[in-house]
């Protein structure tokens, strides 16, 4: 039989060993609302996102929890699992399993939803109609039923002195090993900076930064057909962490070799665990800056693709689009014009989606099999599919590199001090754009035609493309041409 643990006895049961330990008991709902250890206030953490399935339970699901409590039947709320922690002298109880069950009860007690319609219970040979009542109405009209909720005992399994790794394994391999958890839901439960990075970007909440790549929109808001979708992606959100998975795959391919493709989901999960527990990301996600830069490229590429090819902005197409563009930039030491690149990419896609073109080319897949229509290669993410796609793209790039929007950048980034001083004297020690007197200490060299526009457009780091301006004007000008910025200056003066 499970031991019955009360709030008074908690301090006698927990913190008695330095080794991993567990024991079972129960606490009333009143303790879940106001947790204590003895007379000391404690915290109940119901929001650790590592232990949350993405799909949030519905109001009707929550109402059924309250019906179970109030009906007094044989049915019981399933046991919850709590990790015991101590932070700065405060007891913290972290819900590892049972978050939605507990939140369902607490949300009702906090007045966030009513009891269901047509809810009538039999109490002491009387039928009591609780249909649509909120908690304050139950408390005012049927105090004994309110007390029934507050005194309802919830079975608990308590765990103390568990490491993050132990807790993650407990959640995925013991408590949820019979559930239909997706591979990404399992990866989400691996505690670490990389998991947090993916979760916070792909499913931002509250004040978290929302990268425009992961913007969501709500269709049919306020109706029974309300549905959340991605603004830029054609990826269905079924509540299985689909965007987490896309971002995970993007990171894996970037760091492990894009052309190698993806291994099995199990191997990705093993890598995910190892790199955060034993490897490079144990203490921090050291490649954050590299992936941030890739996501900015992804936003520009996928946004350009939405203009004419939105129906193809699914998981596989977007991964190939982004990672091949990233590879081109590294290979040619260049920048990519997103719209031009995307248009050429799908021109090639349509060309090689013709079986006659594939047959006449004499080319094969990497595995030696006959080359199918291009679209059929996008049904998999393995090394053969990705490598065969890249083989075709490489052929087309060799034939027309400029068609892919490749912009050659002048490798020389900055002007010499001698050139800047000579140009400053030549400009009569004035700012080129606003013609105000300019001290040498505030003078900077500016590319009149931006370097990022490429060599062919005139964005060279040479004397003829150099003008001297102030630091503030240089910042305001950003990536515009000097001519465009000059017009803005004149218009505002």
Image (tube, rainbow, N blue to C red):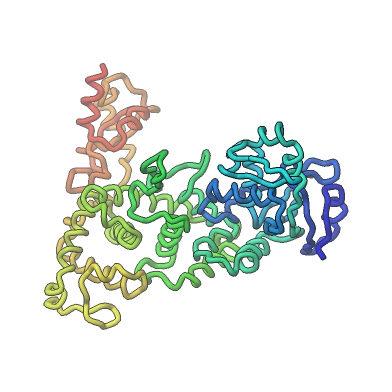
Image quadrant where residue 3 sits: bottom right
Relative horizontal placement of residue 387, taking residue 459 as reference (left or right): right
Residue 391 visible in the current orientation: yes
| Residue 114: % across, % down | 59, 39
Give the camera-side residue of 361 and 43.
43
Q: Which of 404 and 46 is in front in this view?
A: 46
Which image quarter holds the N terminus? bottom right
107 shown above or below 345: above
- On screen, residue 200 above or below 448: below
Quick one: which residue is furthest to the top in this view?
493
Examine the rendered structure and indicate whether residue 362 appears above or below residue 200: below
How many numbered markers are drawn?
Answer: 0
Name the residue furthest front: 125
What residue is drawn where x is 76% and y is 45%?
124
**Res 88 seen here:** no
What percent of the width, then of the height, locates residue 453? 23, 44
Q: Indicate the position of residue 306 as horizontal and vertical percent values.
A: 26, 49
Residue at 62% x, 36% y: name it. 134
Quadrant of residue 156 within the rendered picture: bottom right
**Viewer-closest of 4 and 113:** 113
Identity of the residue drawn at 21% across and 50% down: 308
Q: Residue at x 79, y 40 (%)?
A: 41
Q: In this view, does 205 lie to the left or right of 458?
A: right
């Amino acid at each position: 039989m499970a031991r019955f643990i009360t709030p008074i006895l908690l301090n006698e049961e927990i913190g008695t060993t330095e080794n991993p330990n567990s024991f079972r008991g129960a606490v009333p709902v009143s303790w879940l609302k106001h947790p204590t250890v003895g007379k000391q206030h404690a915290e109940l953490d119901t929001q650790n996102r590592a232990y949350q399935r993405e799909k949030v339970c519905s109001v009707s699901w929550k109402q059924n929890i309250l019906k179970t409590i109030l009906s007094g039947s044989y049915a019981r709320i399933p046991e919850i699992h709590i990790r015991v922690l101590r932070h700065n002298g405060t007891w913290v109880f972290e819900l590892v399993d049972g978050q939605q069950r507990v939140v369902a009860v607490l949300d009702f007690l906090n007045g966030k939803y009513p009891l269901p319609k047509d809810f009538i219970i039999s109490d002491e040979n009387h039928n009591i109609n609780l249909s649509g009542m909120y908690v304050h109405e139950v408390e005012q009209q049927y105090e004994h039923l309110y007390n029934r909720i507050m005194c309802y005992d919830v079975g608990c399994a308590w765990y103390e002195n568990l490491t993050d790794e132990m807790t993650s394994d407990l959640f995925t391999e013991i408590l949820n090993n019979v559930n239909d958890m997706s591979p990404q839901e399992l990866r989400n439960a691996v505690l670490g900076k990389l998991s947090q990075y993916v979760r916070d970007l792909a499913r931002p909440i509250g004040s978290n930064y929302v990268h425009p790549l992961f913007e969501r929109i709500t269709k049919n808001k306020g109706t029974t057909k309300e549905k959340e979708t991605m603004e830029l992606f054609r990826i269905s959100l079924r509540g299985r962490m689909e965007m987490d998975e896309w971002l995970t795959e993007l990171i894996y391919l970037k760091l492990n070799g894009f052309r190698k493709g993806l291994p099995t989901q199990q191997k990705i999960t093993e890598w995910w665990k190892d790199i955060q527990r034993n490897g490079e990301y144990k203490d921090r996600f050291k490649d954050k800056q590299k992936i941030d830069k890739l996501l900015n490229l992804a936003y520009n590429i996928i946004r350009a693709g939405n203009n004419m090819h939105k129906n193809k902005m699914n998981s596989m197409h977007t991964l190939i689009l982004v990672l091949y563009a990233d590879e081109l930039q590294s290979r040619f030491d260049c920048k990519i014009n997103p719209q031009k690149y995307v248009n050429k990419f799908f021109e090639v896609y349509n060309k090689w989606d013709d079986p006659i073109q594939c047959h006449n080319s004499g080319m094969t897949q990497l595995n030696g099999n006959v080359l199918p229509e291009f679209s059929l290669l996008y049904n998999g993410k393995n090394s053969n599919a990705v490598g065969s796609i890249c083989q075709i793209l490489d052929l087309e790039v060799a034939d027309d590199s400029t068609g892919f929007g490749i912009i050659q950048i002048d490798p020389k980034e900055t002007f010499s001090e001698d050139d800047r001083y000579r140009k400053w004297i030549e400009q009569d020690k004035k700012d080129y754009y606003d013609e105000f007197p300019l001290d040498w200490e505030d003078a900077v060299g500016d590319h009149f035609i931006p370097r990022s526009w490429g060599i062919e457009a005139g964005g060279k780091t040479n004397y003829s493309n150099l003008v001297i301006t102030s630091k503030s004007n240089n910042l305001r000008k950003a990536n515009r041409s000097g001519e465009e910025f000059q017009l803005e200056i004149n218009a505002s003066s």
